[in-house]
Image: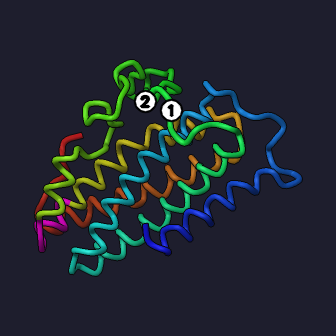
Amino acid sequence: MTIAVVAVLLLGAAVGLLIKLPGADTSSTPARDSVDVGFTQDMSTHHLQGVTMANIAREKTADPAVRQLAFDIASTQLEQVGRMKGWLFLWGYPEQSVDGVHMWWMTSGTHGHDPAASGSGSGDAERMPGMASSEEITKLRSLTGVEFDVYFLQLMLRHHKGGAPMAEYAATRAGQSVVRTLADNMLKSQTAESTYMQQLITERGAAPLPS
């Protein structure tokens, strides 16, 4: 992990610690089975893969638009991961669900997520919606030029769309106002980025990957 990455994570964690300041929403620590805890654990994991793909793009692309987008995504999501991990530390919960089950905190069927379908464990079969498989990441690393740019945009667009329902759910159902605000900001920024990525994909004569 580079010094810059560590600095961003520490900054995010420091922001997360600000919820202990006077006037912050700290009247109660969220329960282990709350939306707040589940969302921060799962979205941190989801974000970190997005950061990985964005960092690959920053290293490999020769396209200024793709490089700038990748930089923006990596910077934003690293800061958000640091913030969420800071909250989990303050609340006394692990950074990830101890049983490896994802999205158990989403009880509504309206978002197309079945918590029971997420299973447990860390294999590709258990990844959250929108996340790339290990084979897809390997393929991404192997490509170059426009072919690389298109595949990165396709994977990242699918990644954003897969995580959006989690952010939408937490934005309206989390108990802590800081969590609701962060989730809402994620939803808005990633919706805008998704629109932009769709444009970039179209301009390069390609189409999005199936959901």
Q: Position of residue 122 (x, y in %)?
A: 34, 34
User: Which quadrant of the view contains residue 67?
Assistant: bottom left
Q: Position of residue 2 (x, y in %)?
A: 44, 72
Q: CA distance from mark 1 to mark 2?
A: 5 Å
Closer-to-camera residue (96/68) = 96
Image position of 144 (left or right of 66): left
Of the residues shown, which amino acid type is indicated by label 2? Gly
Label 1 Cα crowd, 10 Å radius (few <14 / some 14-19 / many 20+): some
Vertical placement of residue 35 versus 191, above or below: above
Vertical placement of residue 144 versus 108, above or below: below
Q: Residue at x 56, y 71 (%)?
A: 7
SS class, disc 1:
loop
Q: What is the magenta range?
A: 143-151
Q: Is residue 108 magenta?
A: no
Q: Residue at x 42, y 53 (%)?
A: 48
Image position of 122 (left or right of 82): left
Of the residues shown, which amino acid type is indicated by label 1? Ser
Q: Residue at x 33, y 67 (%)?
A: 55
Residue at numbered disc 1: 97
Closer-to-camera residue (167/76) = 76
User: Which quadrant of the view contains residue 30?
Assistant: top right
The image shows a total of numbered marks equal to 2
Q: In the rendered structure, are the residues bearing label 1 and label 2 in contact, judged by CB atoms less than 8 Å apart?
A: yes
Q: Position of residue 39 (x, y in %)?
A: 54, 38
Q: Main secondary structure of the magenta part?
A: helix
Q: Position of residue 9 (x, y in %)?
A: 55, 63
Residue at numbered disc 2: 100
- The quarter of the image holding the N terminus is bottom left
